[in-house]
Amino acid sequence: MSHRTAAPGARTTRTIRTTRTTKAFASGTEGTAAVSGVVRTLLPRYAAALDSTHELTGPALFAAELRQVADVSPGRRDEYATVRRLARACLAELGLPPAPLVRGADGAPGWPPGTVGSLTHCQGYRAAAVARARDADGLGIDAEPCAPLPGRVLAQVTSAAERAHLAELAAARPDVPWCRVLFSAKEAYYKVWYPATGCWLGFDDAEVALRPDAGSGTFVVRPVSGGARRKRRADALFDPVATGFPALRGRWAAGAGVVVTAIAAPAGSLPCPAQAGRTATGTLRCAQ
């Protein structure tokens, strides 16, 4: 699975690849799906959240959405369509009309005015979450296969402190793929961070603390300074902590072949929308 961030100034699509399963993803009929409901349990009541283990075949996509997937594979088109149909159903739950969710130049979906939302998909699972902006500053959801990360990926996406934390968790609860939960929590955090700041964030720019429970639990993600790989990037002087962006608490669940994480930032919890730009030297800055 390919993940959703990129080099500074580029599209928000990560090039880090993790393991993926090959289980076929079944097609559903219009308006029906095999729903696990897990994502709804991870978010506050003010958020509408829906998930599916089958593709949805209706209603039809908007013309602007169809143009974005005109040249992609049928499988990619189906997952693109299903998460947007789920999002449309979430909007309806909030009493809002359907609207096209078109990717911007950065690859992130655009949400209707007055709303915030998040989409995710992995093999065998699709989900969407939407809230009114009066209730939330941001939402971030992520789904991953319920399997450990390859060792080479783990080294790229975690700090030494996080790896020690994972070892302690694994000793206590070896049945949970803790490294995958941590990875997913960072993805969910990024989906709240990026719309609010317009700034790229590396895996080494945030740290996660996980709290276990029986198949589910909570976590906290916080920005950190001096990431191990930050100095090798063009924006080496950028300090995520200096943006004033807060640590955020989220919830996770693992089971039925999938790990799902979710973060809701209540209204008023995030800094005022930042203006991202570049200095004369090309260093990325984030001004409040």
Image (tube, grey):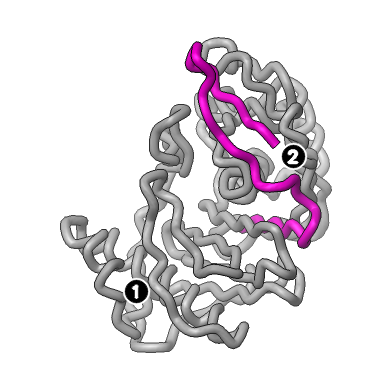
Which residue corresponds to the image point at 42% horizontal and 76% vertical from the top-left?
99
Looking at this view, is 3 or 164 the one in front? 3
Q: Is residue 23 left or right of residue 215?
A: left
Give x and y (percent) for residue 240.
Answer: 69, 29
Which image quarter: residue 264? bottom right
> In the rendered view, would you say 107 is above or below 208?
below
Residue pointed to by mark 2:
245
Q: Residue at x 67, y 67 (%)?
A: 133
Q: Which mark is residue 26?
A: 1
Q: Residue at x 56, y 58 (%)?
A: 258
Q: Residue at 39%, 52% (x, y): give it.
A: 104
Tag 2: amino acid:
Phe
Residue closest to the eye, 35 or 271: 271
Q: Is residue 182 left or right of residue 218?
A: left
Quarter of the image where one finds residue 288: top right
Q: Secondary structure at mark 2?
A: loop
Residue 177 seen anywhere in this rendered image of the structure: no
Q: Which residues are magenta?
A: 260-288
Q: Position of residue 53 (x, y in %)?
A: 46, 72
